[in-house]
Image (spheres, rainbow, N blue to C red):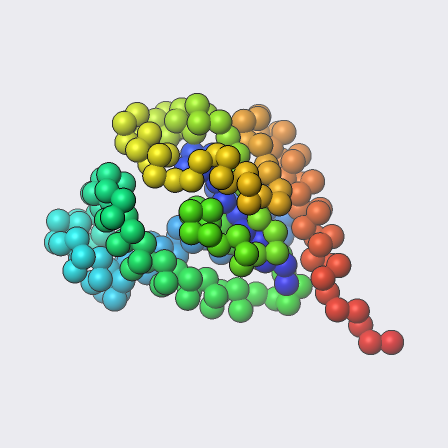
Amino acid sequence: MLKVGLTGGIGAGKSEVSRLLVERGAVLIDADRIAREVVAPGTPGLAAVVAAFGEQVLAADGSLDRPKLGSIVFADAAKLSTLNSIVHPLVGARSRELEAAAAEDAVVVHDVPLLTENGLASLYDVVIVVDASPETQLDRLVRLRGMSEEDARARMAAQATREQRREIADVVIDNDVPLEDLERRVSEVWAELERRSQASRPSPPE
């Protein structure tokens, strides 16, 4: 099994890269999706979040009001740290379960938005960083996700810098490019991941 950490700043286009890797055969473990699952209604995770931040972070149907929670934690580093201390251990445990269920020869891609910030690079055989300019990130967040410019800039500022992400990268995928160029680059990276995966497998007995 080859364990790959995939990360990138908000709005860099990491989801598109993970989709293209899955198309080519990767097993995807999406930390964001798991983070939503572990705070679903009725979970201990949601109870812990409400205990920390109050009933104000609940929507009318009892689910987590993610925009409301986001507006609280992204403006306050201490509150963001509190939220992370609740959610990250739950996400890590679930990620390990999913990884253990993958085939021995799989290329397992862990999509981890805060890989750099949380010092997780050493957990993976290969770290891929999806890179885009801050201007591109801001444009995508405002134009495609409907964020206000102020909110988008606050979320970008709460993450590692572009330089910090690139420092831990084994592979950088430039996503300031047209989709066809991105697809070509992902195919190149996938070929390299498959090569590394095969090289890491034990030789069959004579």
Q: Is residue 123 left or right of residue 93?
A: right
Image x and y of residue 90, in percent? 36, 63
How many callouts does the rendering have?
A: 0
Give 164 or 152, whichever is nearer the viewer.
164
Q: Outermost residue, right direction? A: 206
Q: Is residue 183 left or right of residue 97?
A: right
Give 172 or 139, whichever is nearer the viewer.
172
Q: Residue drawn 53% across and 69% down?
A: 100
The N terminus lies in quadrant:
bottom right
Image x and y of residue 181, in percent? 63, 29
Whether residue 124 is situated above or below residue 13 in the rendered picture: below
Q: Is residue 17 left or right of residue 193?
A: left
Image x and y of residue 169, in percent? 58, 43
Q: Residue drawn 20% across and 63% down?
A: 47
Give 62 or 91, whichever is nearer the viewer.
91
Image x and y of residue 115, in percent? 46, 49
Is residue 26 visible in the rendered image? The answer is no
Q: Residue drawn 61% across and 56% down?
A: 125
Name the quadrant containing residue 179: top right
Whether residue 13 is situated above or below residue 113 in the rendered picture: above
Name the quadrant containing residue 206: bottom right
Q: Residue drawn 62% across and 42% down?
A: 171
Is residue 168 visible in the rendered image? The answer is yes
Q: Is residue 127 left or right of residue 116?
A: right
Whether residue 54 is situated above or below residue 204 in the rendered picture: above
